[in-house]
Amino acid sequence: MINVKTPELYVSEPGAIHLLGTLMGKAAAKAVVVWSETAKKVTQKDVCKSFENQGITMIQYEFAGYPNIDTASAIAILALNNGVDFIVGIGGGRVLDTSKAGGDIANIPVIAVPTIAATCAAWAALSVMYTKEGNFDHFRANRRSPEIVVADTTILAQAPVRYLKAGIADTLAKWYETSVGYDVKNSSLSYMNSVNGARLAYDFLLEKAEKVIRNFEAGIIDENSVRTIDAIIFLAGNVGSYVGEKAYSGFAHPFYHSSRIIRETRNKLHGEIVAFGLIVQAVLEEKKEKELLEIVEQFSRLEVAFTLEEIGLTEALEDKLNTISERINEIFPELNALSGKKKEAVVEAVYLADEYVKRFREGHKDD
């Protein structure tokens, strides 16, 4: 059995936010809008005008903190008590994951309006839930993806470029992680579909993303800018949309989720820690040094090759890495990337990944 979870409509273009009210349809009368302080400042004028033009009543919920079940439940209760037709999440991954969980609890359709292109959260049915302090808690498998995704590329291009870089790293991860243990002769069609979609995004980003980063820094939106956003949201999101008997089992995302137990990592972006985790994964897979350095070189060109210090892991390092390694083995015991390796091997691989990045920088400091 293949469980398919995808949005019904994906709109990705400059000025897409002006279509929000129209996309909700003539029958829509009320909506809860969940947004962060920053997202509200960026979008409020356009969202309010779009709602007014369609005669839609807006009930606001200002989000702060991390996605957690209490906040999602509060949004669900607000939506149910007001008899709304949609829950509209506007912001980054935290806002969107919380909105999706709230919609799932209330059984009310969700519209995702990402304001940063840092993850595929706008597309995915999954919500990543945290403690109120920011430690990873659990995955919530929502019954469906957002019904509509509205990706306004003008808004996304105006966000700090750090988010775009993190989104590129998160998307590259889909290929590296889906392909662990991939056997084309013995894989289901759903799994092959995910792997090939991940590869499509990977190939496009390696060819175009470096120039797109420069364009974003200059405020330029061209066709490849839009395609990069589509790769981050649509292609990467679609990788996880077809769930059959086998889920991919790479290392980078488990490393991210497990690292959140360390407070100092919590001001780093999802994709930044995932990028480091991908290099660790390559070490665990026992890739040859030449191939490892090629990965570091690729990530360096895209400005997503980080050291341990840069992802917030410094003091009492041995203890922190042991804690992360223990958590990976506890929460993700079946990872193909680990293939029976003990926690000591994970810690050693983390140190080696850090060393490879530093060695590459030392050899290219005059570039």
Image (cartoon, grey):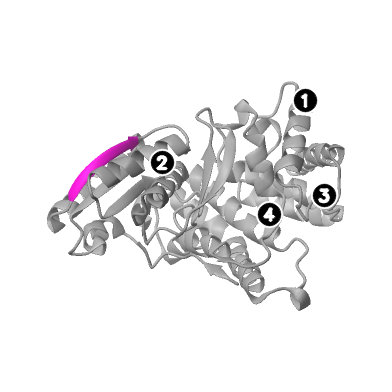
Task: Locate residue 204, reporting x and y percent.
Answer: 58, 66
Contact (Cβ within 8 Å) of mark 3 with mark 4: no
Viewer can see residue 361: no
Q: Position of residue 86 (x, y in %)?
A: 29, 54
Q: In the displayed structure, would residue 186 be above or below residue 230?
A: below
- Specify the farthest residue to the top: 316
Numbered label attached to residue 305: none
Residue 139 lies in the magenta-colored region: no
Q: Residue at x 76, y 46 (%)?
A: 280
Q: Mark 3 or mark 1, which is nearer the start of the sequence? A: 3
State yes or no: residue 61 in magenta. Answer: yes
Q: Which mark is residue 284?
A: 3
Question: Which numbered disc, 2 or 3, marks the residue closer to the eye?
Answer: 2
* Most foreground residue, 291 or 272: 272
Q: Residues within 10 Å of mark 3 (few under 14, many from 20)?
A: many
Q: Earlier in the sequence, mark 2 or mark 3?
A: 2
CB under 8 Å between discs 2 and 3: no
Q: Which residue is mark 4?
A: 298
Residue nearer the viewer, 99 or 140? 140
Span of residues in magenta: 57-62
Of helix, strand and loop, which one carries label 1?
A: helix
Of circles 2 and 4, which is in front? 2
Amino acid type, residue under disc 2 in the picture: Ala
Question: The disc labelled 1 sits on which kind of residue?
Answer: Asp
Which residue in the structure is indicated by mark 1? 319
The N terminus lies in which quarter of the figure?
Answer: bottom right
What's the amino acid at mark 3? Leu
